[in-house]
Image (spheres, rainbow, N blue to C red):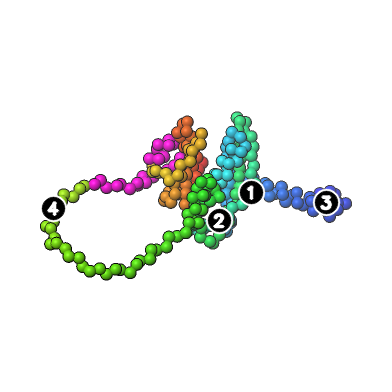
Amino acid sequence: MGEFLKGRSTVQLAVFAILILAGTSALAEDWLCTEASSQRSGNVVRSCGIGLGNDENAARRDAFDNAKTEFSALCGASADCDGHAVNVYPERTNCTPQGGGGFKCYRLLVFTITEQLAEREAIAEMPQPIVNVLRMERLMPKAEPPVEAPPVVEPAPITAPPEPPVERVAEERPMAVPFRLTPGVKIKVGMTKAEALEKFGKPDIVLENAQNVAVFYRGRKFCYGIACMFRFERETGLVTTYQDFRIEFTEALN
């Protein structure tokens, strides 16, 4: 090594040092995402997600979603994270082709927990129609309370003697039964759309295309934040993905 460094210029030595540091950093990231799912140091959480897909883009998206889900589970169980605003920074993504076809990706995301309380509106991750609804609600002016006019004093009218009360039979009306969440219910990939709707109730927003239907809930206790959703295929009627459900209403990650 000493013989190698002899006769080298300062610029060459600096470039050599940078290459060594970059290689060490890459090995550290590979170790984190292949050996652990998350790591926290103070208010910084390094969260890893593993994704599989028929092509590299699909595997990258799956790994990205799983990294967010991993962080949501950790944050929801931490008193100094749940309800606080966070900043997210994408880090390295490592994808490799699989022998039987498809790709496998490791995705590292770094979350910084702030002291500011959040409104829990994951606008950047929501579909555009949801974002538009939230923005409209914020921009709409609040209704001013009506101004009551001063009472008008009128002379008392001359009325006839009151008629005797007529006995009426009270009409029985069926009482509306509010939707109650079944204890222990969990969203999972592969369940039927009918089963999911039966368990979580009527959705607030439904978005459709030729292949899939996305179902959104707002302000429900099983949502992590202001909204959560699941998607199912038209052809099979089976749930293929879900997002922003609280961890206790989802199946544990493998």
Q: Nearest to the eye among marks 1 and 4: give it.
A: 4
- Taking the spot 47% from the left edge, 31% from the top edge, the residue there is 235
Mark number, residue 167: 4
Q: 10 Å neighbourhood of mark 2: few (<14), some, or many (≥20)?
A: many
In the drawing, does residue 105 fall left or right of residue 232?
right
Considering only order in the chain, which callout, 2 or 1, is on the residue closer to the N terminus? 2
- The residue that label 2 is drawn on is 86
The number of callouts visible is: 4
Q: Out of 53 and 254, give the one closest to the viewer.
A: 53
In the drawing, does residue 196 fall left or right of residue 78?
left
The span shown in magenta is 173-198
- The residue that label 1 is drawn on is 91
Q: 10 Å neighbourhood of mark 3: few (<14), some, or many (≥20)?
A: few
Residue 82 in view in this figure: no
- The residue that label 3 is drawn on is 12
Give the amino acid at mark 2.
Val
Marks 4/3: CA–CA distance: 104 Å
Q: Nearest to the eye among marks 1 and 2: give it.
A: 2
Residue 168 in view in this figure: yes
Measuring from the top left, give residue 53's x and y in whole percent: 58, 36
Q: Secondary structure at mark 2?
A: strand
Q: Nearest to the eye among marks 3 and 1: give it.
A: 1
